[in-house]
Image (cartoon, rainbow, N blue to C red):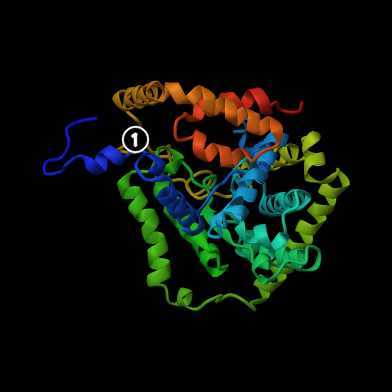
């Protein structure tokens, strides 16, 4: 939409929204596609177990969603997508829903081992898929977060080596940390940067592979350009200016770190036992064990916060002279009505433009799902001509919509 910038021939903009097979000979396209898939880097989150347990954005039945996850991994193996993670096994959303650090770590690792068992049951080899798994944790302010990564790596490496006979690369757990969104407060929002800095220090000292620092105003609004720059500066200052961070693993060997590592590992293994006694991860989900535990821990945290036993500076203790009221930011980012309508219009145009191809492609997708074919392989073609809504509704008819156990 809008006028083209001066001095261009329109070619680059014409290619936006087209796929290679529409402008290239088939043999050239297939060669480029194979190379691109083998070289592309990135991550699919696609973790259905944490969706059911914590995040509540499930759309398909759990069984069908697991099947699709397996299809993604199988496609990645067949197409040699070595640098793209097929699932980000996520504890972040478990923590955001209210779980304490032990529960976050135990549930996330247990979910990870569930995927391992499922992929093995489909005939995949451990060393073909384990390197394509990554993990995603939240770092709050509690002491256990100082060792969450090293405990995860210790448990994962031992299990993959001793139980699943995975190779050296399969034993290496890769994880991303995001600082805790739940620890951001709408009162004295400037203090949030201090909390985020301390959580980022935990993550870097614990050797995370990648890090996301939250913006201080996220308790109220989508981050502004100014708050995002401040959040980014936290990482840059730690990594480029802080002397101790230039040394890898600077806290290893400290008594508290070694002691915490052992204690947290022991607590996680105890939680594994509790899950195992309920029939494993999927069995425990049938009785809503994980959801119930997360909700209990969330209520406990909120109770301590409200009665002041858990001190939060500027929120329930050391209030400023105005009583630390909720801060209203100078700028609140929201999509305009014009932007919303433009997106709806673009979607309608896309569907109208591809109307002649969409119906047959969606029917083929359904037939692939019913016959046991690889759904992801089919999706790679279908998504060129069909919208997300069209694809979802077609798969509802063959895979079932999500229904929560009650």
On the image, which quarter does residue 404 sit in?
top right
Query: Is 42 or 148 nearer to us in this picture?
Result: 42
Regarding residue 401, the answer to whether it shows in the image is no
Q: Quadrant of the N terminus?
A: top left
Q: Nearer the viewer, residue 395 or 180?
A: 395
- Horizontal and vertical percent position of residue 41: 48, 57
Q: Is residue 163 above or below residue 136?
A: below
Q: Position of residue 326 (x, y in %)?
A: 42, 37
Q: Does 330 sit left or right of 75 as displayed?
A: left
Is 396 located above or below residue 154 in the figure?
above
Q: Secondary structure at mark 1?
A: loop
* Residue 345 drawn at (x, y percent): 34, 22
Give me the residue at 75% from left, 28% from top.
405
Taking the image as shown, residue 115 lies to the left or right of residue 88, namely: right
> In this picture, is 382 found above or below 126?
above
- Farthest residue, direction right: 277
Residue at (42, 62) in percent of width and height = 235
Residue 79, placed above or below residue 253: above
Q: Quadrant of the C terminus?
A: top right
Q: Quadrant of residue 341?
A: top left
For the residue carrying disc 1, how many other residues have a C-alpha within 10 Å: few (<14), some (14-19), or many (20+)? few
**Mark 1 = which residue?**
332
Question: Horizontal placement of 336 versus 384: left or right?
Answer: left
């Amino acid at each position: 939409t809008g006028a083209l910038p001066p001095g261009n021939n329109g070619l680059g903009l014409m290619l936006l929204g087209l796929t290679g097979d529409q402008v290239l000979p088939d043999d050239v396209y297939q060669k480029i596609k194979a190379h691109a898939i083998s070289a592309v880097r990135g991550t699919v989150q696609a973790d259905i177990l944490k969706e059911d347990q914590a995040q509540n954005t499930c759309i398909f039945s759990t069984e069908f969603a697991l099947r699709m996850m397996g299809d993604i991994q199988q496609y990645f193996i067949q197409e040699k997508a070595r640098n793209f993670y097929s699932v980000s096994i996520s504890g972040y959303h478990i923590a955001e829903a209210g779980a304490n650090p032990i529960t976050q770590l135990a549930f996330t690792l247990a979910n990870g081992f569930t995927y391992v068992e499922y992929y093995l049951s489909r005939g995949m080899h451990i060393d073909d898929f384990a390197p394509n798994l990554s993990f995603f944790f939240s770092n709050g302010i509690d002491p256990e977060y100082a060792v969450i990564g090293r405990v995860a790596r210790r448990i994962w490496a031992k299990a993959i080596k001793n139980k699943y006979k995975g190779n050296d690369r399969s034993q290496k757990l890769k994880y991303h940390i995001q600082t805790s969104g739940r620890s951001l407060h709408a009162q004295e929002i400037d203090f949030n940067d201090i909390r985020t800095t301390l959580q980022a220090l935990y993550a870097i000292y614990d050797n995370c592979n990648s890090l996301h620092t939250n913006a201080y105003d996220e308790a109220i609004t989508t981050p502004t350009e100014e708050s995002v720059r401040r959040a980014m500066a936290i990482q840059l200052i730690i990594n480029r200016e802080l002397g101790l961070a230039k040394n890898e693993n600077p806290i290893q060997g400290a008594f508290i770190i070694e002691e915490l590592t052992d204690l947290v590992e022991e607590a996680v293994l105890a939680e594994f036992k509790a899950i195992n006694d309920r029939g494993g991860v999927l069995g425990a989900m049938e009785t809503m064990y994980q959801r119930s535990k997360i909700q209990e821990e969330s209520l406990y945290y909120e109770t301590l916060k409200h009665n002041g036993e858990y001190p939060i500076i500027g929120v329930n203790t050391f209030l400023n002279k105005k009583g630390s009221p909720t801060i209203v930011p100078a700028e609140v980012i929201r999509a305009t009505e014009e932007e919303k309508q433009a997106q709806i219009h673009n979607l309608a145009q896309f569907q109208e433009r591809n109307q002649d191809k969409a119906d047959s492609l969606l029917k083929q997708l359904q037939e692939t799902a019913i016959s046991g074919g690889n759904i992801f392989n089919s999706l790679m073609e279908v998504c060129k001509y069909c919208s997300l809504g069209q694809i979802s509704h077609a798969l509802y008819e063959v895979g079932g919509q999500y229904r929560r156990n009650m």
